[in-house]
Image: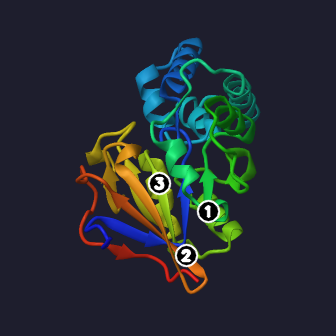
Amino acid sequence: MPPSPASLACSALLFDLDGVLVDSTACIERTWREWAARHALDADAVLRLAHGRRALETVRRAAPHLDDTEVAAEAAALAAHEARETTGVLEVPGAAALLRGLPPERWAVVTSGVRAVAEHRLRHVGLPIPPIMVCADEVAHGKPHPEGYLAAAARLGFAAAECVVVEDAPAGLAAARAAGVQALAVATTHAPADLADARLVAPTLRAVAVRVERSGGGAVLRVELREATAGGAGGAETSVSAAP
């Protein structure tokens, strides 16, 4: 089968978690609305800050009157709550099927959630916990800083430019751009117009297909859209790797 006109070739895939593999939007929004109410803050404004960012950064931006100790305590309490909550946490349709087709050494998760929350959500929806996962409590800087994506690429053994990020939030796409990684966005939590940093934009994860092409003892992952893009840079096939 010839390459799709809307495709990316890479050595590895770096997935965001919430909004990409796990649909936790209802859980996240409920948690932040309750937190905003307790602090007499505008819940909608808090939610605009929260998507794609670590709780630590969100609390710091939303409540600048809190000192560092208070910010850390609030973020820890939010994480502890989300590490127990299952209501409104679902598999993103198509996630299990997509991951089943990937070699385990060719993908990782980079999430703005702490490890306890990330593992809890993956187990709850029945998705595999990858050997390599970079979580919010394991980096000095959260998205939109590139640290998480750079760390994941390095741990997989590839240069960042050989990877493709799959994201749903502007903060994560900004992190991918800063890391020098091309991105495919899924318009699950944001409108396509908000995802301009992505090379390609898919309406849903089910619109994304990944083919593993093996030759000469190596493999290339070809990421394709099953239907037309809904935004992003679009255009012809782009190769971002010379996979060994």
Residue type at numbered disc 2: Ala
Residue 124 horizontal side relative to residue 9, left or right: right
Residue 239 horizontal side relative to residue 80, left or right: left
Q: In which quarter of the image is residue 239?
A: bottom left
Residue type at numbered disc 1: Pro
Read off the residue under disc 3: 166
Q: Do the residues labelled 3 and 1 touch (CB within 8 Å)?
A: no
Q: Where is residue 173 in the image (x, y as percent from the top left)?
A: 44, 55
Read off the residue under disc 2: 219
Residue 143 horizontal side relative to residue 82, left or right: left
Task: Give 223 or 77, whichever is nearer the viewer.
Answer: 223
Mark 2 crowdedness (10 Å alpha carbons): few <14, some 14-19, many ≥20: some
Residue type at numbered disc 3: Val
Using the numbered discs, state the Cα–Cα distance from disc 2 to disc 3 in whole angstroms.
19 Å
Q: What element carries label 1?
A: loop
Read off the residue under disc 1: 103
Q: Compared to 63, does 10 lie above or below?
A: below
Using the numbered discs, state the Cα–Cα distance from disc 3 to disc 1 in whole angstroms.
16 Å
Using the numbered discs, state the Cα–Cα distance from disc 2 to disc 1 in whole angstroms.
10 Å
Q: What element carries label 2?
A: strand
For residue 74, the mark is none
